[in-house]
Every structure is written in C-alpha cells, then in structure tokens.
Image (cartoon, grey):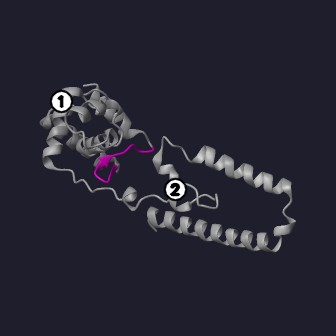
Amino acid sequence: MSEESVIDTIMDDLLMEESRLEQDLSTSEDENNEMVDAETQAKRNWVMLMRHQFSVRAEFPSTKTILKANGRLNQEYFRPNADTHQKKEHIWTVAERDLLIQGIQKYGIGNWNDIRKELLNEWTSNDLRLKCVRLIGRQNLQLYKDWKGNADEIQREYENNKRIGTKYGAWKQSVLVYDDGGKVEEELVAYHQK
C-alpha cells in the first residue's frame, strides 16, 4: 500500500470519527439542552475562543479554513495535497554522470554540497553520494574521503573493488561490501596504502 493511500485511509477514518462525534454531540445537546449548565457552556466558549485565537492567524491567510463554522477542526485543512506525494521522476543521464566525475575531480569525494551547487543542483547531496557509490563500486566511501580522480582513475577503482568483492563473495548489487571475516577491509587498506 502506498504512503499516499495510507494517509488517505487515516484521514478518512478521522473524518468519519469526527462526523460520528459531531452527530453524537448534537443529539446529546438536543436531548440535554436544558441540562447544560453555565460552567459547561463557559468551558465551551473558552475552547472556541482559544481555537480561534491560536488557530486562525491573520498573517497566514490559509488558516481561515482551519476551523469549521461550529468551531471544530476542519480535517480537510490537514489533508495533504495530492501533488505533495507525487515526486517527479528524474532519470540519471550520462551527461550528469560526467558532471559528477568532473565534480569528484575538482572537489573530491565527500564534498557533495560543492558538487551539487556548481554542477548538479537538481540532485540532493545524498543522491550524489549514492551515485558515487555506484560509480566507484564501494558501499563505504570512507577511504575515499576527499579523493580526487578522473574518469579513468574512477574506472580503475571500480574494477579493483569488483575484483576484491568477487574474490571474497562481497560484491552485492554492483558494490563492494565488507565481509564478516575482515578480509575485504584488510585488502582495501593494503591497496590504498600503495
């Protein structure tokens, strides 16, 4: 079930519950209209005043619809727009891959904000980190902190990471992951000390 449909289901349940409570309240008010004492009515009036005072704000015009005419919260106000959950699909292109390589060559791995600001501002820093993980072929980029390399050097790193991963059974979903025995880490440290 998608996140949007879960939210819609929850909101529908809340609206039904509020509607039921309003119906119960109006029925009990009609039946017991004479039984509402001054203290209860004063409490209701105070609640209405507080809701209006703290919910409806002149500086935020959209809050005009936060309350219903009867003073209850308008659940529709809190329902997210359908557009909120629809993320535009952005496909990673060869040109963007080349820009990422250019950014790595200029700023070094780990400096995602600099690369993003100058070259790939449509992507988040985390997106760029994940793209680099795929580019280098290594899940953990710690040993590459601030490393700068061109396309050929990045390809060499990828091939070495794949070689090590294949050797130790640690090549998962096209990236090198650490093994439980520590052999991958030992070989990586030795390789990077060259």
Q: Position of residue 97 (x, y in %)?
A: 17, 44
Distance of mark 1 from mark 2, alpha carbons?
52 Å
Q: Residue at x 73, y 68 (%)?
A: 25
Compared to residue 108, the image places residue 122 above or below, namely below
Secondary structure state at the residue bearing disc 1: helix
1 or 2: mark nearer the eye: 2
Instruction: Check residue 94 for magenta coloring.
Output: no
Image coordinates of residue 1 in percent, x first then y, are 46, 68
Describe residue 56's horizontal placement relative to residue 184 as left or right: right
Q: Nearer the viewer, residue 97 or 12?
A: 12
Viewed as shown, does residue 119 lie left or right of 13?
left
Q: What's the residue at 14%, 41% (across, down)? A: 98
SS under mark 2: helix
Picture quadrant where residue 67 is located: bottom right
Q: Residue at x 51, y 52 (%)?
A: 64
Label number found at residue 65: 2
Q: Can residue 156 be seen in this view?
A: no
Give the image location of residue 130, x and y in percent: 31, 44
Q: State which region is magenta.
A: 171-180
Q: Would you say 2 lies left or right of 129 here? A: right
Q: What residue would you read off at disc 1?
A: 105
